[in-house]
Every structure is written in C-alpha cells, then in structure tokens.
Amino acid sequence: MKQFRRVLALATVSLVALAACGDDAEETTATDPAATATTAAPAATEEPADATTAPAATEPAAPDEPVGDVAQAIVSLSPTATEILFAIGAGDQVIAVDDQSNYPAEAAAKASALSGYEPNVEAIAAYEPDLVLHDGTTDLATSLDTLGISDWVGAAALSFDDIYVQIEQLGAATGHVAEAAELVANMQADIADAVASVPALETPLAFYHELDPTFYSVTSNTFIGQVYGLFGLRNVADTAEGTSDYPQLSAEFLISQSPDLIFLADTKCCGETVETVAARPGWDAISAVANGGVVALDDDVASRWGPRVVELVQTIADSVNAVATVTAG
C-alpha cells in the first residue's frame, strides 16, 4: 500500500553521501507572513553555511533503474514539486495540480480547485491517483493512508542539498532517474558559475529582502537568506531586534540602514515596483534607491525551492555586479 514510500526511502539512502557533502544552508521562503507561518518557518535553526562559497558540487546519485512501481497518475499539491516533475520530464504523468501550481504553462493547464493548504481528501481521491505529492504541513498523509493512496512529502528545503535530494527522489518515483540526475548537475554548475561571476568585494554590500509592503523580511538563518549569503552580502534584517527569522522591520530602520540592494519579493502579491519603492517617504535617501539597486523579483521564483532557484541566484549575481560597478565608480 505504501510502495512509493519504500521506493523513496531506498532512493534517500543512496543520497545520504550527497547530502553530507554540501553546505548546510537553511530553510524555506514565503511571499507573505501568512505563508511563512504555515510553510516557511524552519523547524530548527542551524549554523549558517560559509557565506562566500557556493554549495559543494556533489556528484548526483547514479542513474540506477527505478525500484518497484512507477507513478503514472500523480496529483501534486505542492507548486515546487510540480515544477520539479515537469523539469525532469514527468509532466505527462501528472493528472492534476493544486490551485497554486502555475508553472510551467503545461502545469497550469492541469490546475484544479485542490488546495495544498486545506486539502480535501475526498476531492483528491476522486482523481484516482497512485501518488499524491504534498509538503507535510497538514494531516493529509494519515487520510491518504486510510484510503490506501501513496504519498510523497516534500518539506520546505533547509539547504541546497535538500532540493537536490527531492529532485532525485521524484526522479526515482516517476522513472526519470537519469533526467533528475542531469537536472541536479546542471543546477549545481549554473549556481557555481553565477557565484564565480561576482568578484570578492572589500566591503560587503548590504541588502534588504522584502516579503511584503509592511516590511517583513528574512534573516540569514532562512534558506533564502543563505542564497544571498553565497555572495557575501550583509543582511540588514540580521541586526533587527527580536528572535524571529522573519522579522517585521520599520521604514525608519531601513532608511537608517540604507541597504545597497533592495529585492522585492512582493511584486505579484502586492504590486510593488521600483517606482513605488522610490515614492515611499524618505526612501530616496537609501543607497539602493539612489543607485539603481532596487530589484523586482518574481514572487514565485523567490519563494519556491525547485529548479528555478537558479534564476534567483543569477538575478542576485547580476544585481550585485551592477551595483558594485556603480558604487565603485
């Protein structure tokens, strides 16, 4: 009844060496504080990885033949898992995705009214899936087990290696082991190239990552914070008062910190733009606003830990290089 759990357990064992070789970055991301509370808050805070080095380019798991059954009718309730499936060539095996899975276009075409936040097990079962993907933040697994439906849990990533392991696991579950291994190798190479494109700066640039217009942000203890840490950037949120890794900052604090870079992860949800930030009272004095260092991100790319994390890393690299050139001149 739980054949897929056994398959994935075997796949995970073969990946222990991979996970042990990489940096221990952390956590997950969210596009707003509410999402943070349910999907993004880390279970535990670990010591951050070396902020100036890219994740170790570990060898992906060998592309062995998949063990046991291969899922042919998949329901994905995780936008990140959905993106992974299509990236490894398993899109044809997906019969439905949740209401937040909007990428790629082929996945959006299979969108349904299913919710990953408040899953309806009867509605899920109506699709007659042989595998359901979810993030493990609800009691869905118990309900699916009762109905004899296999599931896969892809918890929010705490490190780059967590991403790679999830990709390899889904490759094993869908019969796309080689494609998954290739995707991991390409991601590692692209991330390493992006990091290498940024020269070491004598004085680290400061940045602010905005989750919403009320100034919620992330510290370096989060996974998204670790992505920025690859470039040796200084996170202004790390000096904020309080113990939350998702602190709510103030306009006054941000003006006083005058970060060199502002990354907006609230462009879709809240309509924030370079222009709206520049129009905020007193923000014209912030270095990022004065020197063209305000960067509009795609909310989804900034909050999911799947294959498109490479796009985020590349965007940060380009932004750091551009602002470093301006400030140096």
Image (cartoon, rainbow, N blue to C red):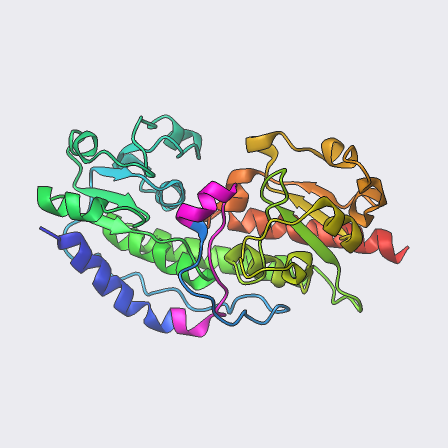
- Judging depth in this view, the residue of 244 and 171 nearest the camera is 244
Which quarter of the image is occupied by the C terminus? bottom right
Q: How many labels does the image show?
A: 0
Residue 106 forms part of the magenta stretch: no
Say which residue appears at 73% left-offset and 31% top-offset: 276
Q: Where is residue 158 in the image (x, y as percent from the top left)?
A: 44, 60
Relative vertical location of residue 186 with respect to residue 94 in this rendering, above or below = below
Q: Kindly identify the residue that appears in the image at 43 percent across and 29 percent down.
A: 105
In this view, 280 is above or below 189: above
Whether residue 28 appears in magenta in the rendering, the answer is yes
Residue 163 coordinates in the image, percent (x, y): 42, 57
Left/right placement of residue 165 relative to residue 127 reads: right
Magenta segment: 19-39
Quadrant of residue 165 within the rendered picture: bottom left
* Residue 175 appears anywhere in the view: no
Q: What residue is rendered at 80% in x and 56% in y?
A: 324
In this rendering, position of residue 242 left or right of residue 307? right
Q: Residue at x 54, y 53 (%)?
A: 246
**Would you place residue 2 above or below residue 56 in this image?**
above
**Image x and y of residue 20, in percent:** 40, 74
Res. 252 in view? yes
Name the residue nearer the viewer: 39 or 180: 39
User: Along the line of sight, which residue is nearer the eye, 205 or 251?
Assistant: 251
